[in-house]
Image (spheres, rainbow, N blue to C red):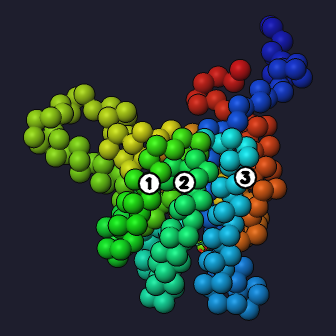
Amino acid sequence: MSSTPAITAPTSDLAPAASPPPAHVAIIMDGNGRWAQARGLPRIAGHRAGARAVRRTIEAALTHKVGWLTLYAFSSENWRRPRDEVSDLTALLRHYIKNEIAELAANGVRLRFIGEAGRFAADIQASLAEAERMTATNARLNLTIALSYGGRAEIIAAARLIACAVASGEIDPSELDEAAFARRLFTAGMPDPDLIIRTSGERRLSNFLLWQAAYAELIFLNVLWPDFGAAHFAEALADYASRERRFGARPA
Ligand code: IPE
Ligand code: IPE
Ligand code: MG
């Protein structure tokens, strides 16, 4: 009888192949409320400090030459928050776009917004469209902000478009594939995220990029979003670099 084959590979085979830098980093920016609460401040103070962390994060993405950065700023479900908090958040959004757009444009940032823009006030919708238009030819950093975004709502919207295309005879159901479905998502034309970071210690996706996250590496950090900065971004990139991505294939 033959002996049991050894299952331990030589050490050199165990060293994971370092991943190339992520092309697309997506961040669930969580913990603003707890940051404010810990300081005895109103929640809006946490959201304002969170906006400053957004600025630091964009700078870090530019420094590390990450081509795609997607930030989850407001979920479809966040409309359920108290009316005062929602109106503080929309006021902050108005202020942010007005004040940051020129600098973003000057830094070669292309802005996109994903989510149900139609749920915001008309002036906000107009300024989101204007920001996208103003930065449409930039290519240094593709910055996408998820606003009133929900992964399930996005998938349903795509399914509805497909159903209409089938009903009108434009698509044969047997020809529907992943690429044709992905072209109907808000993220059409964007690469899938390689790395998703969530701050605040919570370990869930909260309806973020459900389709696109299929093979993303996940990093959960015990830092509240307003405290996030260049060092955390670099730490996440280093953690990502040490991981071996397999996409279901046999390990290298
Ligand atoms: C994230 O911070 C910002 C939004 C969801 C708008 P939170 O407001 O969720 O902060 P916590 O989770 O209550 O600390
Ligand atoms: C997720 O955070 C949404 C954003 C960061 C914009 P939440 O604070 O809304 O998520 P839950 O409710 O803790 O899952
Ligand atoms: Mg939260």
Q: Tag 2 or tag 1, which sits nearer the N-term?
A: 2
Element at badge 3?
Answer: helix
Residue under the image location 73 percent in, 43 percent down: 64
Cβ–Cβ under 8 Å for marks 3 and 1? no
234 is higher (above) or lower (below) than 207? above
Pointer 3 residue Cβ closer than 8 Å to ligand 2:
no
Q: Is residue 192 visible?
A: no
Residue 155 position, x and y percent, is 36, 51
Say what amino acid the circle numbered 2 marks. Answer: Ala
Q: Which quadrant of the structure image shows residue 166?
A: top left
Q: How crowded is the residue under tag 1: few (<14 C-alpha within 10 Å), some, or many (20+)? A: some
Cβ–Cβ under 8 Å for marks 1 and 2? yes
Residue 60's label in the rendered image is: 3
The answer for how far apart the CA atoms under marks 3 and 1 are is 22 Å
Pointer 2 residue Cβ closer than 8 Å to ligand 2:
no
116 is higher (above) or lower (below) than 144? below
Q: Is residue 33 visible?
A: yes
Instruction: Tell me if 175 is positioned left or right of 20 in this view.
Output: left
